[in-house]
Amino acid sequence: RGGGGSVMAAQLAQALAATTAPHAEPRRQAEEYLKQAALQPGYCLNLLQLLATPGTDETVAQCGAVAFKNFVKKRWAPGEPEGVGQAPLPAIPEAEKDQVK
């Protein structure tokens, strides 16, 4: 079992928890981290791992479920870019799609 996935899942849990912070700066940093993490291979699988882990904080699980839904919605079969002058988001690799299914 590779340790990289569990490390990323732990970092994702911290970032997801921080998205609910009362102060703007920790939220902004967490949102930026999640945006960058979403570009890494295995992001959606790490979210699923986090969601499947017994004892995951309820708030983290809810935030993770929403992040997973949004990620899959935007990246399963990406279409138009999110903004003017931006490149389309890369699609989820087929190998990851197979594991998600």
Image (cartoon, rainbow, N blue to C red):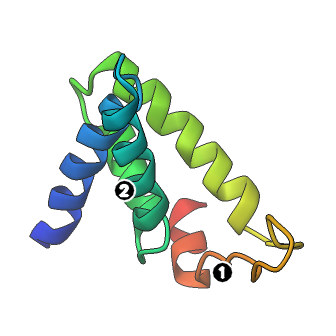
Give the left or right position of residue 20, taking residue 69 as reference: left
Q: Could you say which is closer to the camera, residue 83 or residue 61?
A: 83
Q: Is residue 1 at all visible to an observer of this figure? A: no
Disc 2 to disc 1, how far (Cα)?
18 Å
Residue beneath the point at 69% across and 75% down = 89
Residue 41 higher or lower than 6, as above or below: below
Q: Using the image, tell me which numbered label, if any, was put on residue 90.
A: 1
Of tags 2 and 1, the one toward the viewer is: 2
Q: Quadrant of residue 91?
A: bottom right
Q: Earlier in the sequence, mark 2 or mark 1?
A: 2
Percent from the top left, x then y, of residue 59?
A: 38, 19
Q: Using the image, tell me which numbered label, if any, was put on residue 78.
A: none
Give the left or right position of residue 19, taking residue 99 as reference: left
For label 1, the SS is loop
Residue 85 higher or lower than 23, as above or below: below
Percent from the top left, x then y, of residue 38?
A: 48, 64
Total of numbered circles in the picture?
A: 2
Amino acid type for the residue under numbered disc 1: Pro
Q: Could you say which is closer to the camera, residue 32 or residue 1?
A: 32
Crowd class of label 2 (few under 14; some 14 to 19; many from 20; radius 10 Å): some
Percent from the top left, x then y, of residue 13?
A: 27, 40
Residue beneath the point at 47% across and 31% down = 63
Residue beneath the point at 89% across and 72% down = 80
Residue beneath the point at 52% across and 74% down = 96
Q: Quadrant of residue 24?
A: top left
Amino acid type for the residue under numbered disc 2: Tyr
For label 2, the SS is helix
Q: Is residue 67 at all visible to an observer of this figure? A: yes
For label 2, the residue is 33
